[in-house]
């Protein structure tokens, strides 16, 4: 009886040490994993902070750094009018938009019925995504450096499509310009509208911001 008790007493510290070792290794692995998973800031965002914002402040002579225009969000809308006749088309739009933006789209539905278009209230008619933060910057970087240059005979964007408050909207005719889209898996061509919302107070400020970010506006 005493021998068994002695063996148990001597075995417990060993198990405790073993458990402590596993806990220590677990903390080291978690610490190492956290270091590896540390997110790198988008390069366009870093460029805005280090180069573009100071240049805009100098250009417009802002007294306060908070007056420098910046980006708020980017909205990408893909309309699917034919979805009223074929419900499967909305699935393709949602899939393409999710691949392009890296975010799950919301489905837009008809607010009222229109008999001549065979449209009933609540039917899906499109998909849209609103990007903010790092996803916004990453999408804009890919759009400007990879997608737009792939448009055939591209001659630049119009700089006349501002809304008077520094926000800019432009259209794209197809999704194949984005390298994330596999042409062999596309069921049909889909266009989209992209709206860039800024903190600019007028179109001149908004235009200057987007031009410095790399928007390829047409030369007048």
Image (spheres, rainbow, N blue to C red):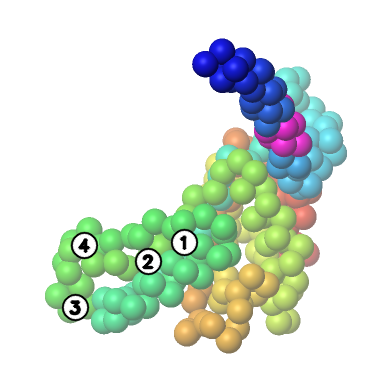
Q: Earlier in the sequence, mark 2 or mark 1?
A: 1
Which residue in the protein does label 3 denote?
118
Q: Earlier in the sequence, mark 1 or mark 3?
A: 1
Residue 95 vs residue 214: left or right? left
Q: Earlier in the sequence, mark 3 or mark 2?
A: 3
Label 1–label 3 contact, CB within 8 A: no
Main SS class of the magenta portion in the image: helix
Q: Earlier in the sequence, mark 4 or mark 1?
A: 1
Q: Which residues are magenta?
A: 24-32
Label 3–label 2 contact, CB within 8 A: no
Residue 180 vs residue 40: left or right? left
Q: Quadrant of residue 19?
A: top right
Q: Is residue 11 above or below residue 113?
A: above
Label 4–label 1 contact, CB within 8 A: no
Report the residue at 79% width, 40% height from top: 46
| In this view, the mark in front (3 or 2) | 2
Q: Quadrant of residue 68?
A: top right
Which residue in the protein does label 1 denote?
77
Q: Is residue 204 above or below residue 195?
A: above
């Amino acid at each position: 009886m005493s021998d068994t008790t002695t063996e148990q007493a001597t075995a417990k510290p060993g198990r405790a040490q073993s458990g402590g070792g596993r806990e220590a290794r677990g903390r080291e692995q978690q610490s190492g994993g956290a270091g590896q998973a540390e997110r790198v800031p988008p390069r366009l965002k870093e460029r805005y902070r280090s180069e573009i914002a100071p240049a805009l402040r100098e250009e417009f002579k802002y007294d306060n750094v908070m007056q420098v225009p910046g980006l708020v969000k980017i909205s990408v809308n893909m309309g699917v009018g034919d979805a009223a006749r074929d419900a499967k088309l909305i699935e393709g739009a949602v899939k393409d938009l999710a691949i392009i933006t890296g975010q799950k789209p919301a489905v837009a539905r008809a607010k009222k019925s229109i008999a001549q278009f065979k449209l009933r209230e609540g039917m899906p008619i499109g998909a849209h995504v609103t990007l903010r933060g790092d996803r916004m910057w990453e999408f804009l970087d890919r759009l400007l450096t990879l997608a737009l240059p792939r448009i055939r005979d591209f001659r630049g964007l119009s700089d006349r499509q501002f809304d008077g408050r520094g926000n800019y909207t432009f259209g794209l005719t197809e999704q194949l310009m984005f390298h994330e889209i596999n042409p062999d898996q596309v069921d049909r061509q889909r266009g989209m509208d992209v709206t860039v919302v800024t903190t600019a107070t007028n179109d001149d400020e908004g235009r200057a911001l987007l031009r410095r970010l790399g928007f390829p506006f047409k030369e007048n």
